[in-house]
Image (tube, grey):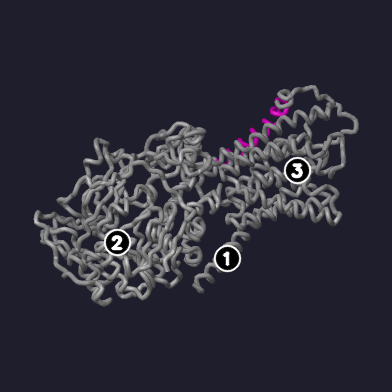
Amino acid sequence: MNKIFEKGGKFYWLHSTVDAFETFLHVPGTVTTKGSHVRDAIDLKRILILVVIAAVPAALFGMWNVGYQHGLAVGDPRLNILGNWWYGFLRVLPLYLVSYIVGLGIEFACSQIRGEEVSEGYLVSGFFIPLIVPVDIPLWMLAVAVAFAVIFGKEVFGGTGMNIVNPAILTRAFLFFSYPNYMSGSSCWIHYKPTEQLVDGFTGATPLALDGASAQYGTGFWDLFIGTVPGSVGETSVIAILLGAIVLIWTGIASWKIMCAGILGALFVGGLGDLAGISTIPCYMQLLYGGFAFGIVFMATDPVTSAQTEAGKWIYGFLIGALCIVVRLFNPGYAEGMMLAILLCNVFAPLIDHCVISAHLSRKAKKLKTA
Amino acid sequence: MSQNFVLKKGLDIPLAGEAALRVSKTIAPGIVAVQPTDFKGFLPRLLVKEGDPVLCGSPVMADKKNADILLTSPVSGTVKEIVRGDKRKLLAVLVETDVRQQHVDFGVRDAATLDAGQVRQALLQSGLWPWIIQRPYGIIADPDVRPRDIFISTFSTAPLAPDSQFCFGSELQAAQAGICALSKLTDGKVHVSLDGKRRTSPFSGLRGCELHTFQGKHPAGNVGVQISHIAPIRKEDIVWTVSPATLVAIGKLFTTGRYDVRRKVAVTGPMAIEPGYVETVPGMPVKEIAPFLGNTPAESLRIISGDVLSGKTVGMDGYLGAFDNQITLLHEGTEQELLGWIRPFRFNQFSADRSYFSWLLPNKKYAMDTNLHGGARAFLMNDGYYARVLPMDIYPVYLAKACLAGEIEKMERFGIYEVLPEDLATCEFVDPSKNNIQAMIEQGIDLMLKEMA
């Protein structure tokens, strides 16, 4: 690094930023000073970029779906796959620009204030945020929400690794409670210009809001599984999300225990709902609706905010799945339970771990006493 | 009752440069350093001055807290220099060796016929006492305590660790005498663990002790890990551990009447030229192994006394540590690596993480260097990411964080009594956040020592 960026140099205030770009280009020549003289080649950059790669299929599909849904809405399904994708790409790109410029800007500034290297955590959050908001969200709202989530969700606690709730989920929650008109109902999920003529009987409501009633879309199993339905940008395609899940589970970055437990929890409550007659849709369909798949694969498994202990992961995942469906079944005003379920369980994760560890330690102590 | 333990967790680090099983040189060093800093908890008081003649086994310094605990010279000669550091801290006493090595005669005795007091007296007098380590905390043992048990791990699973069979194959008789002596010092048992991967062990014929076998990846050979499986350390428990080299030295004290800490030392590592063994004494200057270094410039070479995970950087002017029977030579990885972390394949870098492809080449050895391979970050991954390389029933990240925070109660809860920094070395190796976990544990142990004193 040039001397002017080092401590005492003229541009020291840019130190963290320059360091971030420099270490992005190449692994620095830092050597070990304490402890183990050799270290594993893995670093956080590698781990977090893999999470981004895992979410790429969902993002690409989401962009295509934006174009496809628009075509359906205006009765003009002439565009081919690439055309649809390009249409969606142009709509989603501004979301990405806002998400990264605002989020990384704050991250860089805070790192500089703390005198630390910039942590890569926001690479992932910033990639997720555009995928979990409606495509037509006004950009200034997104900017405000990102700023709130990064500052109050993460930086005040000390940055990446210290946060209690997932910043991406917090962004969405902020938007949801501050600007509900833009985050729910039937007009926000599909991009169209006010001047465009919509087809008769069009409704842009998501299948979740319609609760399985048929609109002009098919909302059968395969539509939901493939993801050709309205919704937040990246959340609709279960199959694209599953591709990401395979990457995350294979590399061990995300916990398969959390994912499995989440699915079990959802099936359990969904099944109870079916038996009690509260719900009219089969419980397994709950796994395909709304943000469940995206949430359980990418959001619930965030290693910082999820439960740390192995037993805790089962409890944490199960609670998320179960709570999500509870919200869906009992709250007619608000159809999506995933966001709140994850937020709530993020907050409870340390408590879950505390209980698991306490139980484990007292078992161990008992065993030692008898031994 | 002896037991066989198969440990599933752990990590063998495939470092290149294993020592060939032959002694390439017997080194009688011209100068030997007696370093009190090798013995944790030893507060040195000098007993010699420059120019004093010493024999092999003559006391050089005593512990300020207990004048009976002595450190003795491993060679005979004259005291050449007393090396002090900042605030006049005593770092080493350098002894210039003479040609005719003379030993203090401690008398040949049958350890089986002695009582505890006589054994203790012999160990204290000869300077072998500080080589006995107490757990918790890894400090020198207190002669006034009778430990619950004594544990000996006869093998090491650390990267490129010396071969137990090769080093101690001919020492069974001395080891047996050592066991006889040690068993007088405890009301409990002497537990000896053997390498489960080997069919034979020089120690398998030992009597008067409990034999266990341990099979698994590193740190399965660490005595701390073994204790936690055989009989975990509870609060208030005190156990002692003895290295196999010390066990043999204790035995020789009784069978030959001499303080004899000569041993085979493996010179290993990817930068070592024809890695092999030398026979020498602890405190040997590193310069003596110059033939292994070749023409590598000193600034691009890291010389470690000990293994790569927990050894100490000593440099060209350093000395072999008292407890070390291995020297590792590494390349200083100060080079930048263009787009390192984002390349899909980095076949010359080892990673235990599945996001690289080292698992495709399970038998490949890597010429690792000292590069950190990333920037330091806060802990991000789950506890389980670290626990998969630690075959102990503890939560490594919780323990490390408790040590960082200096919370005594939590450190106790999470198992500070059971560990030494070396036991969590594999966790430190795999950490993608590049935390110095061993230093954190050390910090915690130091705090415990201070608070409990």
- Circle 2: element type: loop
Main SS category, magenta section: helix
Q: Position of residue A302 (x, y in %)?
A: 61, 47
Disc 1 sits on a residue from what chain? Answer: A
Name the residue tied to disc 3.
Answer: A288
Q: Residue furthest left?
A: B100
Co-location on one chain, circles 3 and 2: no
**Residue type at the position of mark 2:** Phe
**Residue type at the position of mark 1:** Ser
Which of the pair B232/A38 is nearer the observer?
B232
* Whole-number angstrom distance, CA of label 3 to CA of label 2: 62 Å
The first of marks 1 and 3 along the sequence is 3
Tell me the mark number nearer the camera, choosing from 3 and 2.
3
Q: Position of residue B21 (x, y in %)?
A: 28, 46
- Circle 3: element type: loop
Name the residue tied to disc 2.
Answer: B39
* Whole-number angstrom distance, CA of label 1 to CA of label 3: 36 Å
- Circle 1: element type: helix
Which of the pair A11/B222 is nearer the observer?
B222
Looking at the picture, does residue A305 appear above or below residue A51?
below
Which region of the structure is painted magenta? Answer: A86-107
* Whole-number angstrom distance, CA of label 2 to CA of label 1: 36 Å
Looking at the picture, does residue B273 appear above or below residue B380?
above
Name the residue tied to disc 1.
Answer: A358
Is residue B292 located in the magenta-colored stretch of the structure? no
How packed is label 2: few (under 14 Cα within 10 Å), some, or many (20 or more)? many
Tell me the mark number nearer the camera, choosing from 1 and 3.
3
